[in-house]
Amino acid sequence: MKTAVLLWLAALAAVSPGTSGQAPAVRRRSAPPPAVATPAGDTIAIVGGRILPVSGPAIERGVVLIAGGKITAVGAAVEVPAGARVIDAAGRIVTPGLFASSTQLGIVEIPSSAEGTADQSTTDAGLGAAFDVADSFNAETTLIPVTRAEGITRALVTPSGSRVILGQAAVIDLSGEQAPEGITRAPAAMMAQLGEAGAAAGGGSRASAMLRLREALQDAADFARNRAAWNSAQRRPYAQGRLALEALAPVIRGELPLAVIANRASDLLAALRLADEFKLKLVLVGAAEGWKVADRIAAKHVPVVVKPLTDIPSFDAPGASLENAARLSKAGVRIVISSFETHNARNVRQEAGNAIANGLDRDAALRAVTLEPAEVWGVAARYGSIEAGKDADIVVWSGDPFELTTGPEHVFIRGREISPDTRQKQLLEKYR
Amino acid sequence: MAALFGLLAAAATAQPPAGSARSTDPYPSTYRPRPSRTTVIRNATILTGAGPAIERGAILLRDGKVAEIGTSVTAPADAVVIDADGRWVTPGIIDTHSHLGVYPAPATDGVDDGNESTNPNTAEVWAEHSVWPQDPQFDLALMGGVTAMQILPGSANLFGGRSVTVKNVPSITEQGMKFPGAPYGLKMACGENPKRVYGSRNTAPRTRMGNVAGYRRAWIAATEYRNRLKRWKDEGSDPAKQPDRNLQLETLAGVLDGDILVHNHCYRADEMAVMIDLAKEFGYHIASFHHAVEAYKIRDLLKADGICASMWADWWGFKLEAYDGIRENIALVAAAGGCAIVHSDDANGIQRLNQEAAKALRAGREAGLKITEAEAVTWLSINPARALGIDKVTGSLERGKNADVVVWSANPFSVYAHADQVFIDGALLFDRRDPSPRPRRDFVVGLAPEEASR
């Protein structure tokens, strides 16, 4: 692994601006991608690039074969079959498609002043945990092309709003295909919030929010054990309805992650205690003060989704630090990096770059936007690394994937090359 | 009783006579440059903001000014010598659009002082009276190379009030940050915000036409106020006949006099065109549109009227009037010969304006525009200085100008670049390599651990 890091560093020095005084190079696309997506049945060979599979060491001048939507082979000595479409990736970096872990892609077009285009939250309080973003998903949003043009190929779509339990999140791909094909996994997590936001949503105090969350989990556990009795009205009333209780069942079984948004160290520890009490599969989201309790998070093997560019002190996170991601990683915490934005979900690259600039290991940064979110959200069997058998989500980069002046030259999602066209590009062409 | 009388007498004599310096500048800057040492920075790639890059260049900072700049400078024997060793040097970054101090951290109701959203016209409020100098976000912006900024009221109102331009230095008082000689700005706002804020209360304006009617009504009143004052002065300034003072109209009249610069929040191309006609109708000039996500659609108009556009690199879609935002916006305005500015409007963004410029640079180049780093740095330095009316003294590295300088660890358009050293008026305000504790605003003292602030 150490070797892989060094090799990658060396390669990046060659293609990234570094400190040599040279301007960051912006290369033109090596070949114009087809206007129409490549049929998934053809064989595609990406040849000569520096492959960063994430699941293993870097491969110099390697080959990635894609057929039937899957990665069929990867390595330094892979034969390119006759008739394959060859993409010359010499001098380029090849990575898995990136993952944006906190977005409302496909459920929000314009969050304000365009009523009817935002489905990320509900006013129906009775739905509670049952609220499921997958039912709103619209692949034909202008946001998906804008995001995938920057090399993001999968995303977690999360509900939001002013509730302690927000509802169910889903993993989508950015192919532009509607459900069910465009949805990789639903539900992928149950979202909840504690800390300052939880308090505001749940009775005005951190304690009231925690009590409501515990009550919901207790009810769900009781419901799961006594469903027949409940159906015949021989069970005590629950604070939530049937839909919410059923949605929480896989959380109680420890199958579906409970992703808890919290930032202050005390709130993170409270979430860890809750996870112990109910044997939950916990994910911490935000965790601006995670570094203060990194050892305790690491000891529980709880993954953390961070926005590295979180450094403005608040009463909810007076210890917010640009080094949060690096310190968590060094303490052995599994980290996922996200931009926590929707229209600019694409800026997950910039977040990862800044995490590196503030001490995070490069390999850890790439892992934090590919394989780690794949594992945390339960889709690693299909996505997250360049390995034979996985969906072919592949990006060929003009240089360092985290640099601001580089970009994707080719983006594949489930084996199809994605057109770089976006509504924004069309506006550019109209007015240039 | 005698003491009380004394106080009253003092208060009476403290009343400034009309027309005195104090009456036109009642909250004067008390800024004084920090102590500085003569400093030479050599072996640097220098982006001056005023011409091509200087490779392996040197710059001499003396008495708070840029004394020499070029491929070599004469270093006095007592000068501090910084061997940049391939690092990069730029002018200090200037943000035309900040709310630091008026929307400080912690973001709580107790210090939520940016929008006097109680009337669509609050031209009478001054942002400087909300600025909290202990906002820790000033320190974070300094670490990002920001040496000066305009602090604006919010955009709830047609006329939000006066802005203030400050130097990014630690100070107990706002007056201690105030940029000496910088003109005031007037914040105006188009579009969705005013019509939403007041329309939702079922008061005017509720529509864009209501917005424009509100501007025109105010400018008519300001014109009359100004004429009244002029008549009074023409007739001998008789104190007995002095017209009543009106703070709101005083600010608007200051615009008509050319003393106060208009900074106009406006997203859509068509609305900006209306605002340009409005300015012509009443005889004032717009210094800069702000946000201007559709500036690319009217870049010829902006160029023709000499109006700057302060823009984001990639913000779009968060409301309908931002839906047509494209990443080429800044580069297209620049390529048309316009005054393109990268602004933040954001306490995170202000810390990394160099990165925002890098994204705009990339977008422009990928669209086929030839843009050098030397040109892109003008979006962060001389162009914002021009929009704020401080370009005679700062915004570029030229002999005689204020020594507002940033030494970057790498090409500032790289995501990995840090501001290593930041000078304001030749004084070293921030040094990333200095292990001693950094200046910290009072709010974080004893609250945020020191190891968090890096």
Image: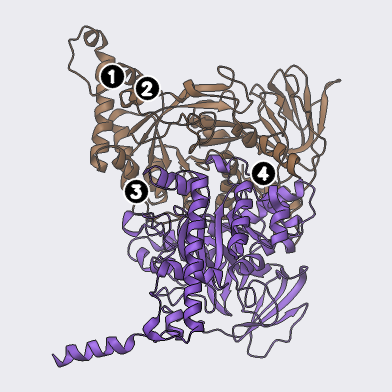
Q: Is residue A256 visible?
A: yes
Q: Chain of mark 4?
A: A
Q: Is residue B235 above or below residue A351?
A: below
Q: Residue at x 57, y 39 (%)?
A: A367
Q: How many marks?
A: 4
Dots 2, 1 in contact, CB < 8 A = yes
Element type at marker 3? helix
Q: Chain of mark 2?
A: A
Name which of mark 1 and mark 4 comes first in the sequence: 1
Element type at marker 1? loop
Relative side of A330 to A254, left or right: right
The kind of residue on which mark 4 rests is Pro
Q: Chain of mark 1?
A: A
Letter of the chain shown brown in the rendering: A
The tag on residue A265 is: 3
Same chain? Circles 2 and 4: yes
Q: Which residue is mark 4?
A: A401
Q: Farthest residue to the front: give it.
A: B235
Q: Is residue B340 above or below residue B382?
A: above
Name which of mark 2 and mark 4 comes first in the sequence: 2
Residue B252 x, y percent position in the rendering: 49, 67
Front residue of B406/B259: it is B259
Q: Which residue is mark 2?
A: A130
The kind of residue on which mark 2 rests is Ala
Q: Which residue is mark 1?
A: A241
The kind of residue on which mark 1 rests is Gly
Element type at marker 4? loop
Element type at marker 2? helix
Q: Quick one: quadrant of the C terminus of chain A?
A: top right
Per the model, the C-alpha gap separating discs 2 and 4 is 37 Å
